Image (cartoon, grey):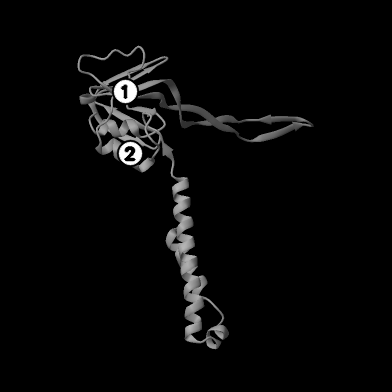
Amino acid sequence: MTFRAVYCLAVVHVRAHPVAHHAASSPSESFNWNTIFGIVIVIGVVSLIVAAIKYATPALRVDGEAPETLKEHLEALAFQPIPTVAAPVGLLLSDGERAYYSSQADVLGEHTTTRRVGGSTGPSLRIARGVYWRASAFASKPVRQTYTQVDDTGTFTVTNKRAIFIGRSKNVNLALAKILSTEPYTDGLLLNPERGRSVVLRTGSQDAWFILERGA
């Protein structure tokens, strides 16, 4: 329920009373009780909403700092200097290359499977009891289904020069200048390179996308 809806319900509760009560009450009596009672209800409802929003907002801890709300965390990624992080074991950085993001990630792939569905049709004639002659043909058609699955699991790292995924069965090494565009997801991102297929990564947050959009 939105704040406006709750506020309206509180106002309706304060103002909605029997006509007989309104006619029997003097103006001063109505003000002293109804107005004060209404103000108390509205203040209480607003306080509950603020507390609920604060409780429901996820808290994040970044680099050992105090917990931040998600909004504050993303604002920091968008506007404040990004601290460097340690590169994962096995990843060699070139001279002047610095890592700004590294986490576990899944590479998701889109796959298509084809199956045939159908049945036999045609006339059927009874020759004898329990014996039938049937002239029919099996007619079928292909049905294509597309699904998404995890193709590989590994580590995704963003530096000031590259976007690198090191997995169990495949590696992706893209220079930032060779990435045409990116697309954010609530729990990852999509990379569109100059050549080859797009890469969909599930990282658990939008941090990598923010850093890439800033150009690391």
Q: Is residue 48 above or below residue 30?
A: above
Task: Classify residue 78 by image quadrant.
Answer: top left
Q: Is residue 3 above or below residue 97?
A: below
Residue 205 percent coordinates (x, y) = 39, 33
Q: Which mark is residue 85?
A: 1
Residue type pointed to by label 1: Val
Circle 2: element type: helix
Q: CA distance from mark 1 to mark 2?
A: 17 Å
Q: Which mark is residue 42?
A: none
Q: Is residue 40 above or below residue 159?
A: below
Indicate left or right for 156 with 118 as reference.
Answer: left
Location of the C terminus by quadrant is top left
The first of marks 1 and 2 along the sequence is 2
* Classed neighbour count for the residue bearing mark 1: other residues with Cα under 10 Å, few (<14), some (14–19), many (≥20): some
Residue type pointed to by label 2: Leu
Residue 165 percent coordinates (x, y) = 35, 20
Q: Nearer the viewer, residue 97 or 168?
A: 97
Task: Classify residue 66 by image quadrant.
Answer: top left
Residue 169 percent coordinates (x, y) = 41, 14
**Residue at the spot x=33%, y=39% of the render?**
74
Indicate left or right for 125 with 185 as reference.
Answer: right
Q: Does any portion of residue 193 appear in the rendered image?
A: yes
**Residue at the spot x=44%, y=54% of the render?**
50
As drawn, the residue found furthest toward the right would be 129
* Classed neighbour count for the residue bearing mark 2: other residues with Cα under 10 Å, few (<14), some (14–19), many (≥20): some
Task: Classify residue 161 by image quadrant.
Answer: top left
Name the residue beneath numbered marker 2: 74
**Residue at the spot x=20%, y=25% of the render?**
177
